[in-house]
Image (cartoon, helix red, strand yellow):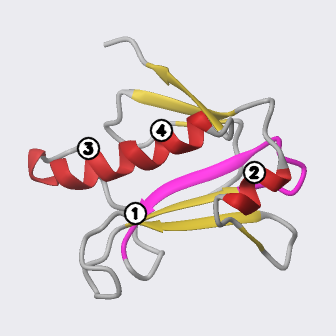
Amino acid sequence: MQFKTEVRLPNSPMSYRLNPEIKVFTLLDLNFTKSKRGNYELQQSLGTAPGSAKEIKLKLTISNDLTTFKMAVVDSTGLQTINIFKQPADQEVQERFNFTIRQLVLRKVLTVTKLPD
């Protein structure tokens, strides 16, 4: 997965961008860690059996210059992408995802745009 200026998750009605007002100290406050390459990474559990093989996580990586990012919802290994917007059974996971995104928007890390139907 490559770094982009705008990300849209499969079947999501929203597109996501980095907020131009993003600050490094905000990322560190939100539990982002700095990788060996200098990028900022967040792996947030979406509450489905944390620590088990069925865990679902939000994986967000922001480039070290704070201009591009990549975002995905993945399984416990972090390798397999999961589409949480496809099935209504994933409503609880969607709510936790939306809560996490809302916090990132409030802290001026991301901006969200609703896509036309």
Left or right: residue 52 versus residue 90 is right
Residue farthest to the top?
Answer: 116
Nearest the eye: 72 or 105: 105
Contact, mark 2 vs mark 4 (Cβ under 8 Å): no
Choose the circle earlier in sequence order: 3 or 2.
2
The number of numbered badges drawn on the structure is: 4
Please name which of the two marks, 1 or 3, marks the residue nearer to the observer: 3
List the residue tagged with mark 3.
Answer: 85
> Distance of mark 3 from mark 4, alpha carbons?
17 Å
Choose the circle earlier in sequence order: 2 or 1.
2
Q: For residue 81, which numbered disc appears in the image?
A: 1
Q: Is residue 33 above or below residue 6?
A: below
| Residue visible at 78% across and 75% down in the picture | 35
> Distance of mark 3 from mark 2, alpha carbons?
28 Å
Crowd class of label 4 (few under 14; some 14 to 19; many from 20; radius 10 Å) = some
| Residue visible at 58% across and 43% down in the picture | 104
> Distance of mark 2 from mark 1, alpha carbons?
27 Å
Kind of residue sitting beneath label 4? Arg
Q: Quadrant of the C terminus?
A: top left
List the residue tagged with mark 2.
Answer: 26
List the residue tagged with mark 4.
Answer: 102
